[in-house]
Image (spheres, rainbow, N blue to C red):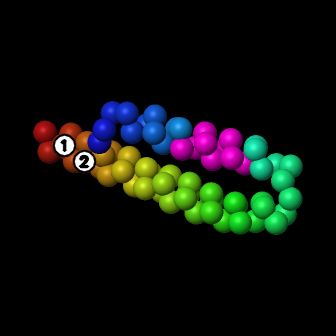
Amino acid sequence: MDPSFKFVAAANAGSHLMTAYLLKDSSLSLLVPMALLAGTLFNCALANALHEVSQSFKDAMRQNVCL
């Protein structure tokens, strides 16, 4: 796993929160499509990040057990 991956995941979560803050006073006709689009993109990216972290953890545990 790339060492800077945790920073990419943190930036993704931060941009998700920033998007929510920027849309807090918007109209419903803008909020619903943006929520669907941003929610889909950010949640998919964070799910992939969680998967990568868990795979790296599993591989690290497997190496420690085999030693």
Q: Amino acid at mark 1?
A: Gln
In the rendered structure, does residue 16 fall within the stretch colored magenta?
A: yes
Q: Pick the quarter of the image with the C terminus.
A: top left
**Residue drawn at (82%, 49%), measured in percent from left and top?**
24
Q: Picture coordinates of residue 57 (x, y %)? A: 33, 45
Closer to us: 30 or 16? 30
Residue linked to disc 2: 59
- Where disc 2 sits, the SS reads helix
Closer to us: 61 or 10? 10
In contact (CB < 8 Å): disc 1 and disc 2? yes
Closer to us: 42 or 22? 22
Q: Pick the quarter of the image with the N terminus.
A: top left
Q: Which mark is residue 63?
A: 1
Q: Which residues are magenta?
A: 12-20
Q: Which quarter of the figure has residue 31? A: bottom right
**Residue drawn at (38%, 46%), measured in percent from left and top?**
53
The 10 Å Cα crowd at callout 2, few under 14, some 14 to 19, many 20 or more, is few
